[in-house]
Image (cartoon, grey):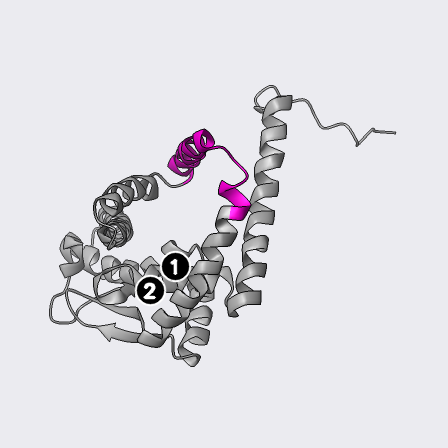
Amino acid sequence: MTNTTTPPQDDDVPWLADDERGAWMTLISLLMSLPTAIDIQLKRDSGLNFFEYSILSALSRPPGRAVRMNTLALYAGGSASRLSHAVTRLEKQGWVRREVQNSEIRCTEAMITEKGVAALEAAAPGHVREARRLVFDAITPDQVAQLRQICRQVIGATSPELAVALDQAIVEAAQDSAGPGAAALDQALLGRAVETACTAAIDRAEREQAALGRAGPERAAESSCTAAFDGAGLEPAAESPGAGLRG
């Protein structure tokens, strides 16, 4: 009878050492417990969950208090579907509204209302106190810098583009507490999202054109790029086809 409880030996698998496994288990426990603890406080004191609070916070920072929906999903750390449902709930409260913008890129923006700002300002003190209690009161001042460094290195592995944009945002936010860093992050994330989608589409179009020998590369690229914008939650404006290539 074959023993199925012992995993097959594979010299190519980089199995974790004991200290690495302990660190990994601790990190996963943190990722599971911290959002739950933050959610509990926010729901109890303000009726918001952490995702909704993150949406309001992201909308409150940039000039004009408006963020494109696909960028907002990156800010708040949720899928486009989850974001849409959350924004709908916030709209029913009168805290957020959506508008379709027609410029170089046709897109939908979410904007925080004055009522939403008031709700955020009411929720912020309790949230900040809880963040301090859960995180910063639990570590030493020296560990704060270590925490930021470790998190930054992990973000660099999981999302290099976000890490670069975050660095820029932190520097600019430190220079001006009004929040230009948030606007810089919004622009960097949006630019990367558009560039990635459209570059991939053009590469795909060129491969298709070379393989099929039909339709000029410009027309194929234009068609594929439009599809890529749709997939990213964006559309080139009707009066300026391909304008989104400029970011």
Name the disc covering residue 50, or none: none
* Residue ID at (21%, 49%): 176
Q: Is residue 153 left or right of residue 110?
A: right
**Which kind of residue does numbered mark 2 sit on?**
Met
- Residue 72 lies, in percent from the top left, at 35, 60
Count of picture labels: 2
Q: Is residue 171 above or below residue 191?
A: above
| Membership of 149 in magenta stretch | yes
**Which kind of residue does numbered mark 1 sit on?**
Ala
Residue 97 visible in the shown view: no
Element assignment for label 2: helix
* Residue ID at (42%, 39%): 158
Name the disc covering residue 73, or none: 1
For marks 2 and 1, give the CA distance: 6 Å
Q: Is residue 156 above or below residue 38?
A: above
Q: Is residue 197 left or right of residue 74?
A: left
- Residue 112 lies, in percent from the top left, at 32, 70
The part of the image, by quadrant, that contains residue 167 is top left
Q: Is residue 104 above or below residue 221?
A: below
Residue 125 visible in the shown view: yes
The part of the image, by quadrant, that contains residue 75 is bottom left
Looking at the picture, tell me which residue is in the foreground, 224 or 134. Answer: 134
Q: Which residues are magenta?
A: 133-158
- Residue 147 lies, in percent from the top left, at 45, 34
| Membership of 235 in magenta stretch | no
* Residue ID at (40%, 66%): 120
The residue that disc 2 covers is 69
Q: Is residue 100 above or below residue 126?
A: below
Pointer 2 with pointer 1, Cβ within 8 A: yes
The residue most toward the right is: 1
Classify 10 Å Cα crowding around label 2: few (below 14), some (14-19), many (20 and above): many
